[in-house]
Structures are given as C-alpha cells and as structure tokens.
Amino acid sequence: MTTTTPTPSGRGVTAAMAPDRDQLLAPVVRRVIGWLTLVSLVALALFGLWGAPTDAVQGDAQRVMYLHVPAAWLAYLAFFVTAAASALFLIPRTRAQVWDRLAGASAELGVMFTGLALALGSIWGRPVWGVWWAWDARLVSTALLFFLFLGYCALRRVPAADPVGAAKRNAIAALFAFADVPIVHFSVEWWRTLHQKATVFNPELNPQIHGVMGLTLWLGTLAFTLMYVYLLDRRYRLAVLEADQADVELEQAILDRTRARSAHV
Amino acid sequence: MSPAPARRPRYVVAGIVVLMTAAIAIVLVFVLSENIVFFRTVSEAVHDRDQQGRTPFKLAGAVVPGSIHRTDNTLNFEVTDGKRTVKVVHSGDRPDLFKAKVPVLCEGRWGRGLVFDSDRILIRHGAKYSPPKVDTKRAPKATSA
C-alpha cells in the first residue's frame, strides 16, 4: 500500500490509529448477559426435551432442530457482524481498530456456530434422511462457508509489517466470504436439495411450525444470541490483552538489550 | 526496515484472497454444472429414460400406498410424482421413516424397462412441524355432538 507508511513492528495498529475501546461491554452488563445465557440454556434444555411435543413425522429426532437451527442462524448473524465491521473498517471516515477486532472475534464464533450446525445437522440427518451427509446445494454451500471463514481466521494470523494494510485486506476477504451467506440461505429455494426448505424465513414468511415447537425454537435462538454476545465480548477482550502483552514484551526486549549494551560499556 | 521482507506477507495475503475468490467461483461452477440437479422427478426420469441408460441418478417421488411388498432380499414399491409412476426394486436398508405417501429419493439406475434398481433410499421430509393430529373420525364421540 502506498497510502500507509509502515509502522514500527510490534506496535500493531495501535500506533497508527488512536487507541479505542478496550472492552465491548461494561462488566455489569457482561455478567448479567452471562447469567441470562445460562438460565436460557437450561430453559431450552427443559423445553427442547420435554416441553415441546414430539413431531408427528420424525418423532424425537426432530428435537435436534432446537439446537441446529439456532446454530445456523447465529452463524449468519456472526458473519453479518464480521462483514459489517469489515465494511466500517474499510470506509476511511469510520476506520477504527475496534471494527477490525470485532470482525475477527465474530468470525471465530461464526465458524464455531457453522461447525455446530453442520455436526448437529448430520446427527439429525442420519435417523431422518437415512444419511449423515449428502452432496446437495445446502450442505455443500454450508461446508464452504465453514472453510471460507476458517481461511479468513487463518489469514488474520499471517504476520504483516503493515498492520493497517493487513487489516484492510482481511476486511476485503471477509466481504468476499460473506457472499456465501445468502447462497446458503436461498440454496433450498434455488436448487433441488435433500434438505427441506425454510420453515420460518420462507418466501411467504409464514412459519410452518406448531406453537410450542415454535416457542422452543425462539427460546433456542435467544439462548444462542445471548451466548454469542457474551463470547464476543470475551474474545474481543482477549484480542486487546494479546496486543497489550505483545507491546509489553517488546518494551521489555528493548529494555533488556539497552541494559546489556550499557553493561558492556 | 528494508522493503523486501515487508513485501512477502503481502503476497501470502493476496494468495489467500485469491483462493477464497476461487472457492466462490467453484460454487458458481457447481451452480451451473449438471451436479446441481440433485434428483429427478419420476416424469423427468421417464422422459429421459433412453438417454440415461445405466447411469446412476436419484429418483424423487412419493411412495404409492399399497404398493410396498417385501421379497427375500429386496423391497419392492412404486413411486409417483402425480403424473407418472414407476416400480422400484430396492436392495439395501429400509429407513425408519419409510412408509406409504412419504417423499423419497432412490439412488440407483434404470433396470429393465421402467423398473428402477435402487440401492439406497433417502427420506425427504417436509418443513412443517407439528404434534400428531388427533383423529377426530376414529376417536370415540364424547357426549352428544
């Protein structure tokens, strides 16, 4: 990049831009969300296993839905946050380190939720479809989404002498990878798949799910969303601490070397 | 710092971005390719019977009620898409949810005439979820109605 001058190594983006928030949520808010996550997960377990009625066609196997579907939705949400934060980083007027770190933290959680959706979908598919996996458009595009953002997470760890330039490229990569999200969602409408069509966010926007089952699904979505927000805050904090630690280590190394030199004199 | 070592990660980064773009391109190729036709309906399969020969494909239809017969080592039934109906000779497992009226995908190839040799059945369930309906016709009538 010609527009940015290389910053002294080790200083990271901090030196190039004004330092900004070192945590996402106030500690009180974080703790409340943490407890609400636990409570809603327990409620989800109770409703998912006993509260919701057994499905007429699939029997108890259908209960996997209450984890599989929220996991898939949260993957969409997490990658949307990554894409939006990346866009905000790319726009010079809004460029701030918080967006880069938020994008990275959210992408890791998105990969986790995509992995969960794939694994739980496989566990659901075996008793119901009769197979663990099928090469249909929904499954293949979801697996691709998993690997795209896994690649993005790897890309973020490639060391760079120009941190702002690297962050820009990461942001562009995130926007490319996000293009797969609408493909995953509409795959069941655009192509013939083994995977069933959307139950809730169908083109008619008319949920095809019985009352208590629908309620349980929303409870699962709430629990997973709270979990996402909590983990996002924790992962963001970890990124801040890692950068601080790198700075401390650099200062120490400089100090050690200066001392060693003065001892020789 | 000399510019040479600073350049190298950029190529690594650019390479990974290119790989990601390529992955998206693969999806688009997948979209346009024949592979995207995950299954064929009974009518389509019957229409393409002669060109298809013995090439494997997936046949989609609903199981015709009353057509299910078990032999020593096969499961015989008929599938329909409402327009055409074909006989299926299935050798393999019988999925738990297999029964009359259920939409199925049979993996296999055309046998003699319009008989489909299946070696795997996939169940295509719908996207509607509900508890079992109470059969009001068969349920004993409560008091006077």
Image (cartoon, grey):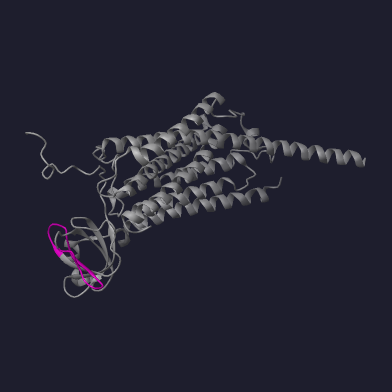
In this view, the residue in front, A52 or B125, is: A52
**Do we see residue A220 in this rendering?**
no
Quarter location, residue B108: bottom left
Q: Residue extending furthest bottom?
A: B112
Relative to A118, is B79 above or below? below
Q: Is residue B131 left or right of residue B135?
A: right
Residue at 49% from the left image edge and 43% from the top image edge:
A172
Q: Is residue A45 left or right of residue B42?
A: right
**Do we see residue A44 in this rendering?**
yes
In this view, the residue in front, B3 or B16, is: B16
Residue at 62% from the left image edge and 36% from the top image edge:
A13
- Locate the N terminus of chain B by quadrant: top right
B76 falls in the magenta region? yes
Q: Residue extending furthest left?
A: B144
Q: Residue extending furthest right?
A: A265
- Locate the C terminus of chain B by quadrant: top left
Q: Residue A1's x, y, as percent? A: 58, 43
Query: How many labels were placed on the picture?
Result: 0
In this view, the residue in front, B87 or B2, is: B87
Quarter location, residue A72: top left
Relative to B44, is A186 above or below? above
Q: Which residues are magenta?
A: B67-85
Q: Is residue A171 left or right of residue A254?
A: left
Relative to A19, is A208 above or below? below
Q: Is residue B64 left or right of residue A59?
A: left
Q: Residue A155's x, y, as percent? A: 55, 48
Residue at 39% from the left image edge and 40% from the top image edge:
A70
Q: Residue A202's x, y, as percent? A: 27, 41
Q: Residue A134's x, y, as percent? A: 35, 58
A240 falls in the magenta region? no
